[in-house]
Amino acid sequence: MSTGVASPMVDTVAPTVAFAPPPPVEPSALPHTGAVHLGDTAHEASAHLADLAGEAAHQAADAALTALGALSGALLAGRAALATTRLLASAAVRAAEEQRCLERQEEISALAAEQWQNAAYAAARANARRTALLARVSRAARTAPDDPPPCPDLPGPLNPVDTRLGSFRSRLARFEKALEQAEAAQAAWEVAALTASLDRMDEGDDWQDAMRARRDTMLQAHMKRHTAVGEQQEATDSVPPALPVGGEADRAAVRERGADILAALDPQADPAIVRLATEAVGHATRHAAANPRRARIHLREARKFVESANRKARKRRHDEERAALQLNFLTMELPDDQDLPDRNPEVVDALRRFLEEGVPLASRQQELVERAVAERHNALEALYLRTQCAGVMARLAEGTEGALRIGRTEDGEVGVDWTPDGWGPDHWLRATLTGGTCRVVTMRADTPGERLLEEWELDDLRCAEAQQKLAEFQKLARDAGLDMRFELERTQGAEPGEPLERTDEEPRRGTRADDRPGLRRKTVKVGDDERR
């Protein structure tokens, strides 16, 4: 027996894979001429049909017309929750450029899967920014009840599922524009609050004028750093240097340079560190005339305080958007499925307290969050892998009279039985996916009595032919975005067993049998024939 064993890796996520079956389609339109036996309790079966129908419908269509399936969308959201800020920002930049190319009718080199990944990552990033912004506004309103920030007028979160790529990218662009306006309004309020605290350092008109003159520059610099391009390039705050030794160090020059240093503060800088920086500039101004050297020392101290405050503010903003990204993924609505983990209330509550109340996560809570995100992502990826492996087997059966059967084995594993043309009824291939490992085995009917030499020779022939089928399986898997490298395990003869069983009871056409025990069968019409 030749058994192919591989650990599939998802290279690119096919965008059309769904959880639930699509609206009824004419079975004769499916690109498959053999019999398909489906266990209605398996999500993989319905998703497999959805994948085949979607491929037939979109085979010659432009990538912009491709709609995102729910399972693909959930898996991409999970990948986004595990990605770095810079990677998400880069995807947002590419998604915007791809939409501009579409509007200019220019050719886009990326495939639909790559374009959808960029769009889904950009959507996850935008939704996280929205969640973090709303939490920040709420916190600011509680700390400044007499002068609260403006309430942002934002649309609801983006949901790319069941939307065509071109249409969704247009909606994404409008969403990001509204989000940028809301972020700018909040940043303007924060800059005004920051400069008001800086004004109190010196009540003189010269200092007041100096800070007011820099207010717009502070806001523009902050918003430029907070764009996707700025995050992609990991732009940082540029703090002016202290006055050079030997340069002019009178009171006016020190005051102007001190104002420049303070103007480089992040609008969300820690007030305690802002106060230290402000005091250092005040000391520098007071000592400018009598002791220029000491004034320069105080300016260098102020610069260090500003750099420290900015690093802390950037980290806080990064942590907030990361927490929002994780929260959005962990609270995403998914269908009830025994293979998907339940929502962890402790993790969700910890993330919400961090965003809404500013309560930092303890190291144990952070570990729980990372584990919950990884578990949900891995479960979605396993479900996706089973669906795609079933789809690969279905493609192998296209154009043949081989029967394809999808269901669960006696061990509860998701299995796909395929009988290649000319193999049946005594031999077939079985693919199972367990713990991230795909195993394709040559099977034979478990018949009583001693087997004849001719039967053993036929087993050897089918095992040899199976190696060719594994090569086809691997190629089709790559086309489906799965990186699979099989290692052959050689034993004696084919493995005896029974085909995946079906009950004799058949659910009514158009109904689901998810709540019935065992695997159900569905009759599909192929041409003028009805097959089970």
Image (spheres, rainbow, N blue to C red):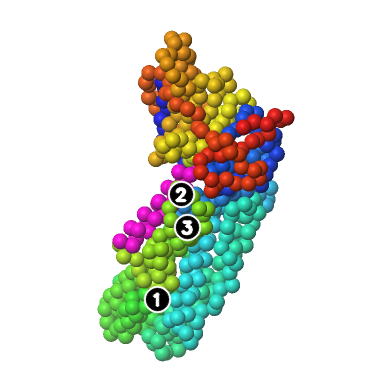
Image x and y of residue 130, in percent: 52, 66
Q: Nearer the viewer, residue 126 or 360?
A: 360
What secondary structure is marked by label 1? helix
**Which range of residues does the magenta coloring cover?**
364-384
Q: CA distance from mark 2 to mark 1?
A: 56 Å
User: Who comes first in sequence, dot 3 or dot 2?
Assistant: 3
What secondary structure is marked by label 2? loop
Give the mark count.
Answer: 3
Amino acid type of disc 3? Answer: Phe
Image x and y of residue 233, in percent: 46, 56
Is 381 one of the magenta-colored residues?
Answer: yes
Q: Nearer the viewer, residue 341 or 436?
A: 341
User: Which numbered marker is on residue 329?
Assistant: 3
Lateral position of residue 406 relative to residue 306, left or right: right
Which residue is at 63% across, 53% downward? Answer: 163
Question: Quadrant location of the N terminus?
Answer: top left
User: Who comes first in sequence, dot 1 or dot 3?
Assistant: 1
Is 470 one of the magenta-colored residues?
Answer: no
Question: Quadrant location of the C terminus?
Answer: top right
Q: Residues within 10 Å of mark 2 (few under 14, many from 20)?
A: few
Amino acid type of disc 2? Answer: Gln
Image x and y of residue 530, in percent: 68, 31
Labels 2 & 1 near each other (Cβ < 8 A): no
Q: Which residue is mark 2?
A: 338
Task: Say above or below: 426 vs 31.
Answer: above
Image x and y of residue 206, in percent: 44, 86
Q: Which residue is mark 1?
A: 262
Query: In which quadrant of the rendered view does residue 210 lie?
Result: bottom left
Q: Nearer the viewer, residue 282 or 23?
A: 23
Task: Say above or below: 100 vs 7.
Answer: below
Labels 1 & 3 near each other (Cβ < 8 A): no
Lateral position of residue 371 relative to residue 226, left or right: left
